[in-house]
Image: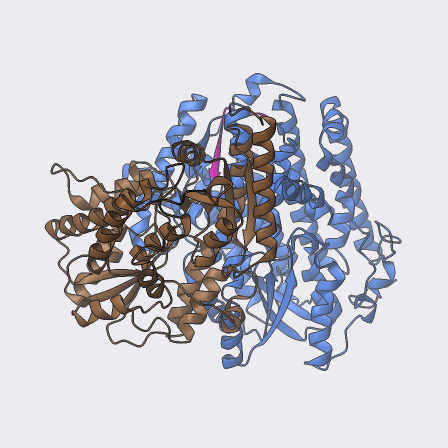
Amino acid sequence: MAKEVGKDRLGDLYTNGKVRKRREWRGFADTLYDYWRWLHIMGILAGFIMKPRNIKAMLRYRWMANYLAVPMMLDRHTQGLRGEYLRICHTEQDLVVSDVAKLLNNLFRGDRRIGNDTEFSKKVVLVDENEMTAVMMGFPTLKGLSRETPSTYVSVLLNQNAAVHYIDVAQEYGLAGDVCPMPEAEAGVSIDDDAPVLGACAIQCNTTCDGSLMSNGVISKRLELEDGIPVFQLAAPLRHREADVQEYAAQEIRNAIAFIEEHTGEKWDWDYYFECAKRVNISTRYRMDWLDMNKTDYPQVFGSNLALYTETNYMAICGKIPEFVEADRKIDALAQKAYKAKKKMAKEYRHRAIIWGVQSHFYFDFLLWLVNCWGIVPLTDMLSMVSTKTLCEDNTPEGREQAIYDIAWLTENMIMRNRTHGGYKVLLDELWEYVEEFHADMVILWEHMSCKALNGMHGQFEEKAREKGIHLVWVTHDLFDPRVISRQGVRDQINRYMRAVMQEEPLDPSLEILHDEHSW
Amino acid sequence: MKDLKHLYYFERLLEDANNDLIRQAQNDGKICVAYTCENVPEPLLNLEGAFSARLRAPRTGSMEMGTYYMTSFLCEYSRALLERAIEGGFNFADCMITPDGCTMMNRCVENMELLKTNEKEKFFYEYMEVPMKADDNGLNLYVLQCRNHILKPLQEHYGIDVSDAAIRKAVQEHNRVCELIRAIGEFRKGDMPRITGYEYHIITMVTYAAPKYLLIDKLEETLEELKTCQPDAKNRFRARVVLVGSEVDDVDVVRLIEDSGAYVCADRFCYGSFPGRDPLVLTDDEDALTQICRQYMYRGQCPRFMNQAKIQERRRYVASLAEEYRADGIIYEQVKFCDPWAYEKMVGAHVLREDYGYPVLAVDRPYAIGVSGQMRTRVQAFVESIEIKKIQGGAKRG
């Protein structure tokens, strides 16, 4: 029970059950802060559950039970954190929790089965979970809501087994077991008819992969043919770096906007769009600053603090919510302060790693484990290396035309798809450029076993790493399904490499083997 | 029933990717344009001075190198092609044009490029973006991509004439082959078919894998032969099925299905004759390239077309084939690890069964099926279930 970073045996807090033994002692100030934030989260949950329609939703939707694990998720992501790192994590994650609570509130308000607020529902546009919401940046009076975000994406962050039931549903319906479990689970939710039904229309996107694209077909079949909700399929080009696809991409955006206008009766608002674009640019500049900081000996915003927040802010928020810019400013101030004081997140940094590939969703706090257990610093990850292009901010006829291309560019460069599509250069060659830029000596390569785009470059990654003398550690997993490879199975792959190849001992031996297979 | 006169010849052509006719065409001074996906408009690869060859990996055995580069989770078709390329089996090709269609095939070709599997001096790789929806925007994209990634490089690297007149001439040859394949396919409609599904599959596949202009005489002879040949007195098949799904390279797939008692009366798989051998209709009021792209896009049955109208049309198309060819059932198949067909097979099987009333068998299979007992058992059981339904009256088709 220590105030100092890295003094505690964090593994001792684990039990065989769903939650850990007790809360971590971080010294008086940090423990008090953490406890205050815990109370804040409990307040959000209490505020949410006080509404009768949300209780009804808890009983109607199977996946809602996972939200009981929200405090535990935060505890997992704050393990061993002190000072600024703890505050950065809470600033980000508390905001994300509050945003998801609002999303759920809105979904159930309009849901035909729960709140059935038809007037509200007419102002809702359903969007994919794996979709840039940039196409909603010009509709201030509409709500772009994703049903998949709370039902599968966030659920698995909260509870590692959350998607298992829906994966089984899809496979029982006849889907092959070798497809990516993320769209598979989303299809399972749709097959199980376990998603809220609302909205004037929906926008789907050919997002990350063939599986995701095909799963959308299953979801739109129910939406369009059974629920009567018109769906626009936004086909963003796959070879997104090519000049000769950009006009097509821009026209898709124009068509999508026209579709939304037609089905909601609302008009695209350029003033609001440029307001959002400015906020996107601010967030981008902060992200770039943090990445620059991570190239030095004193990285500050990295690991899951970088990954989860970037995913949310870049993809789901897209400048629409001002609170995220406020959070950016606060995080930046904390990061600058820690940087000036040459602070470190763990007691020792042994290796500088780039995390590449698609990370295991059921074990998102693995990045924190890397630092705490082995002193491996996850400087940045593939999903955080998204567009850094500055969006046009001029509300002029020329600026508006450029804005359409900017929205198209963002849509094409959605998280994950900006690397898994677009040719091998964006996946393979740019990794080695980042290795040099960030002075990394190690690449942790997530091998999401159902991700064909990544696996298709397996041999090329190995050969290049050998050629460049970089330690390449494969970590195989099945994204949403811990039955295939468990959290300990994930850790074992690192443990073996660190002991056998690097001949090192862990910083915190209590973390090497954890009994968390029953944990949320 | 006697074997078709040229069947052995066609079968021999399919035993090698670099078959006799490819060598003959190259000796004639033509360049070989290799491709890997049906979404590349074939006539554009068959302009004067060029001919197309759809890449296959016949007689595939070990795929260890392909598996090393792409892991065992990618479809065997893509791994088999990469393996063959690494072995030097596609060195005859003069260029490679591939759409960023399915991810696995795209990765396969990228690996070929990175591993420099072809060292011909003028060899080039081109990757196309092909539309995922059938609409005006998609058509503009398709035309531009064909221009930038097929016509322009062919002209620049090999001096191929890519004029409108040259394209129209290529379409004429393409259509002649399509008409012959369609006419031959008509003989599958009868109660006592004069051609087996296996024979038809061989003939159709040859038209993708060998230069068309060298095949036309043999196809014409085959058609004439079928007009007069006598079918067997007793039908050896117990059911008629439409085969739908991933590409079927392995000649044993259709043979195994037919040996198990199910006659493959229509082929709706990648590189099958539906819709791949539908003739293209050109008019004079618009350039040929746009017309070709429009027809490829609107008739395309590829599962990666993502809008619901197109998705529903795919199922209607299968049902209409089943009706036209009087099928008793439908077999949905996918090469193991193929994402697009995994989903299409799942939903298609339900829709064809529940909305159209057809018995459906849904299976996944390896690239090279050989004499799979598992597959044989599945098909035999399916045939028996169809027979039982017939005896019992079965469910009425909706």
**Toward the viewer: B13 or A266?**
B13
Q: Is residue B222 above or below residue A317?
A: below
Residue A306 placement (x, y as % from top left): 60, 56
Q: Which chain is brown?
A: B
Colour given to chain A in the rendered image: blue
Visual colour scheme: by chain
Viewer-proximal residue among A103 and A161: A161
Compared to residue B333, the image places residue A124 above or below, namely: above
Range of magenta residues: A197-204
Q: Residue at x 60, y 70 (%)?
A: A353
Can you give x and y, in whole percent of width and height, for residue A158 in the image?
Answer: 72, 46
Q: Could you say which quadrant of the image residue A357 lies in?
A: bottom right
Residue A202 on the magenta span: yes
Verify whether residue A2 appears in magenta: no
Position above or below: A388 against B267: below
Left or right relative to A246: residue A134: right
